Image (spheres, helix red, strand yellow):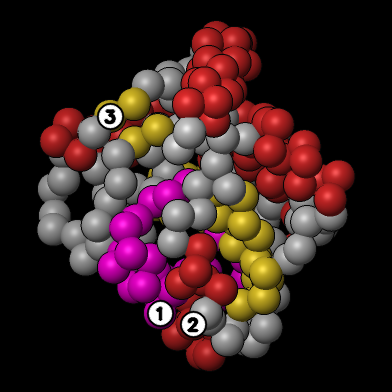
């Protein structure tokens, strides 16, 4: 990354972390901030994936990505893969989804998410489940799956195989939002997914708002 890009990314993250996201936590009376590395996460069972560190999705980036789907959320279950402290769950629960589910393997993150959900008490049914996100059984309803760089390459491959198995067993409408799409090439290779293009204006705003690539897919099975 060149020096100008590094400075720009640092400025973007400062606005998100220290202004928008801090205000969200304070106004909602929740704890979703901070960065936690793998050594700080407590796992009560082995994982088949390769989890990344914890860092919550910035509020504005998630809201833009979700709005880009242009769907009626009342027909869909929303699942956050690697849901951490639950910020995305609480943001998604502002919409009338059928249900909102978080999948998180680290016990210390899961416990914070449970406390945050109890504190907010969203109207949309919302839960955090302690499980391996790479192999979690996806609900039978049409779905929106969300990832914020939740896995390395091996974990992404296992996750995609899990999604494909679910769709072949029960073909249905589905979407995947992948923020910080480092392994987006693995998603682009899948025959059961089609990447939804972003218009030039949307792309430009994405570059201004987000320090990471945002990729959105729909299922084709």
- For the residues bearing labels 2 and 1, Cβ distance under 8 angstroms: yes
The quadrant in which the C terminus is found is: bottom right
**From the viewer's perspective, is 32 left or right of 91?**
left
Mark 3, other Cα within 10 Å: few <14 / some 14–19 / many ≥20: some
Q: Quadrant of residue 15?
A: top right
Which residue is identified by label 2?
164
The boundaries of the magenta stretch are 137-162
Which residue is drawn at the image coordinates 34% and 26% (left, top)? 35
Callout 3–callout 1 Cβ contact below 8 Å: no
85 vs 88, left or right, is: left
> Does the CB distance between marks 3 and 2 fall below 8 Å?
no
Q: Secondary structure at mark 1?
A: helix
User: Does the magenta-highlighted stretch encompass residue 147?
Assistant: yes
Work out how far the residue at label 2 is from the one at label 1, CA to CA, in angstroms. 5 Å
User: What distance separates the C-alpha of mark 3 from that of mark 1?
Assistant: 28 Å
Say whether disc 3 or disc 1 marks the residue closer to the N-terminus: 3
Q: Position of residue 100 (x, y in %)?
A: 57, 49
- Is 1 above or below relative to 194? above
Q: Which residue is depicted at the point 38% across and 38% down?
A: 84
Q: Which residue is mark 1?
A: 161
Q: Which residue was labeled with disc 3?
A: 36
Report the number of numbered marks.
3
Q: Is residue 204 above or below residue 50?
A: above
Looking at the rendered structure, the secondary structure element under dot 2 is helix
């Amino acid at each position: 990354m060149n020096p100008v890009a590094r400075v720009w990314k640092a400025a973007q993250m400062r606005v998100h972390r220290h202004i928008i996201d801090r205000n969200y936590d304070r106004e909602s009376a929740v704890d979703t901030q901070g960065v936690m590395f793998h050594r700080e996460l407590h796992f009560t069972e082995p994982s088949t994936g390769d989890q990344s560190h914890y860092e919550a999705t910035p509020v504005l980036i998630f809201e833009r990505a979700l709005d880009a789907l242009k769907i009626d959320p009342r027909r869909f279950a929303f699942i956050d893969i690697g849901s951490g402290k639950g910020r995305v769950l609480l943001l998604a629960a502002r919409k009338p989804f059928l249900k909102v589910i978080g999948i998180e393997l680290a016990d210390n993150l899961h416990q914070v998410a449970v406390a945050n959900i109890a504190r907010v008490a969203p109207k949309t049914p919302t839960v955090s489940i302690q499980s391996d996100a790479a192999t979690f059984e996806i609900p039978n309803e049409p779905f929106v799956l969300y990832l914020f760089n939740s896995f390395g390459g091996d974990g992404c491959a296992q996750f995609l195989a899990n999604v494909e198995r679910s769709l072949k067993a029960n073909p249905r409408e589905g979407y995947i939002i992948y923020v910080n799409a480092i392994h987006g090439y693995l998603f682009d290779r899948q025959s059961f997914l089609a990447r939804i293009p972003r218009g030039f204006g949307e792309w430009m705003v994405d570059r201004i708002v987000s320090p990471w690539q945002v990729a959105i897919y729909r299922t084709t099975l």
